[in-house]
């Protein structure tokens, strides 16, 4: 990253705006749950995309990936060595595939963005299970860091430290690498906004964390070397070292009362409590 010549202009949200983002995030969580229930050997990635669009529109929301910079589908579905931005189509999923699904929606002008990685049916190896688990838990390490950090850059440092620690005692399988050059972002009235939220330690400390800041945190890990290339579709990022990849993401709001995970069904309460953190009150719960 090149040094910033000025501090980024951050869009800080009011409690009322965060409540609208929570509505968007909760719908997206339900879409992900539905896709998880339909994920099985024999289904095509294109069919999953159709189901996602149907559910989002049936709830009066709009898919925010569809048409974004020309992207042709509602969600990104990346399989095995595909890291991010895979375009759904005729590909048929098979037993043991590692599948990440990334999507978002808009409710009354406010965006959500979240990703989950699944293994179709039975895993092919313990290394695949570890890849998915470490990616998911590194996301929560980053979210937990956001709850007490002073600067946005501390989130990426926490993610990197978690991944490094996970590979020390009793680790089996290839080492995990970060997808460098990609990271999270601010979110609000647009899907991608300031600030950048990298998934690893950088020289950029980032802006101060203040109430009203909303960000999408999204670690992306690859088995083995982190080398990658872009396919001819100008979207799909593929690992070139022979390993599989995983991606996990949540949209998170910083409030006066702590952090609220906008795209988690419980607002992040359970995972944060396991780390000694109390989630902010959910504005959708009376």
Image (tube, helix red, strand yellow):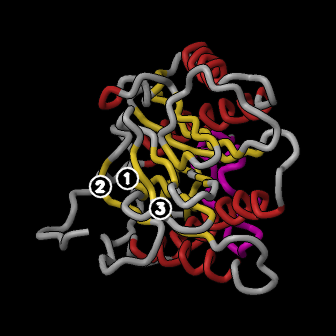
Q: Specify whether residue 271 is painted magenta.
A: yes
Q: Earlier in the sequence, mark 2 or mark 1?
A: 1
Cα distance in 3D space between marks 2 and 1: 5 Å
C-beta proximity under 8 Å, tags 2 and 1: yes
Residue at the outermost right position: 122
Q: Tell me the crowding category of disc 1: few under 14, some 14 to 19, or many 20 or more residues within 10 angstroms, Cα based.
A: many
Total number of numbered discs in the rendering:
3
Residue 245's image quarter? Answer: bottom right
Q: Position of residue 70 (x, y in %)?
A: 32, 26
Secondary structure beneath dot 2 equals: strand
Q: Residue furthest bottom?
A: 169
Circle 1 — which element? strand
Q: Quadrant of the C terminus?
A: top right
| Residue 219 seen by the camera | no
Q: Residue at x 82, y 38 (%)?
A: 95
Mark on residue 194? 2
Q: Residue at x 50, y 30 (%)?
A: 87
Residue closest to the eye, 244 or 3: 244
Q: Magenta part of the protein: which range?
A: 262-285
Q: Vertical placement of 119 versus 28: above or below?
A: below
Marks 3, 1: nearer the viewer: 3
Q: Which mark is residue 186?
A: 1
Query: x, y percentage for residue 269?
Result: 71, 58
Residue picked out by circle 3: 179
As drawn, is 6 to the left or to the right of 67? left
Which badge, 2 or 3, is on the more N-terminal residue?
3
Q: Residue at x 35, y 37 (%)?
A: 234
Image location of residue 215, percent across then percent down: 44, 55
Q: Is residue 278 left or right of residue 195?
A: right
């Amino acid at each position: 990253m090149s040094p910033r010549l000025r501090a980024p202009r951050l869009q800080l949200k009011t409690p009322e705006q965060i409540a609208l983002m929570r509505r968007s995030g909760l719908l997206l969580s339900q879409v992900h749950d539905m896709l998880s229930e339909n994920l099985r050997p024999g289904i095509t990635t294109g069919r999953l995309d159709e189901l996602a669009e149907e559910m989002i529109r049936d709830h009066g929301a709009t898919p925010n990936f569809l048409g974004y910079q020309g992207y042709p589908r509602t969600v990104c579905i990346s399989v095995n060595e595909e890291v991010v931005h895979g375009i759904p189509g005729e590909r048929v999923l098979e037993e043991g595939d590692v599948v990440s699904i990334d999507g978002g929606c808009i409710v009354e002008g406010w965006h959500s963005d979240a990703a989950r990685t699944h293994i179709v049916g039975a895993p092919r190896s313990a290394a695949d299970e570890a890849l998915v688990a470490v990616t998911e838990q590194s996301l929560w390490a980053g979210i937990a860091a956001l709850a007490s950090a002073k600067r946005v850059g501390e989130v990426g440092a926490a993610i990197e430290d978690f991944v490094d620690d996970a590979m020390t005692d009793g680790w089996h399988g290839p080492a995990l690498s970060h997808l460098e050059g990609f990271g999270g972002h601010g979110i609000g009235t647009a899907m991608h906004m300031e600030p950048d939220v990298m998934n690893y330690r950088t020289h950029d400390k980032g802006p101060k964390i203040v109430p009203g800041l909303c960000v999408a945190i999204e670690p992306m890990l690859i088995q083995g070397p982190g080398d990658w290339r872009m396919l001819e579709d100008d979207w799909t990022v593929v690992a070139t070292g022979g390993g599989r990849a995983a991606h996990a993401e949540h949209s998170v709001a910083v409030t006066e009362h702590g952090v609220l995970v906008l795209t988690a069904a419980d607002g992040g309460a359970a995972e944060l409590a396991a780390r000694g953190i109390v989630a902010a009150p959910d504005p959708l719960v009376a």
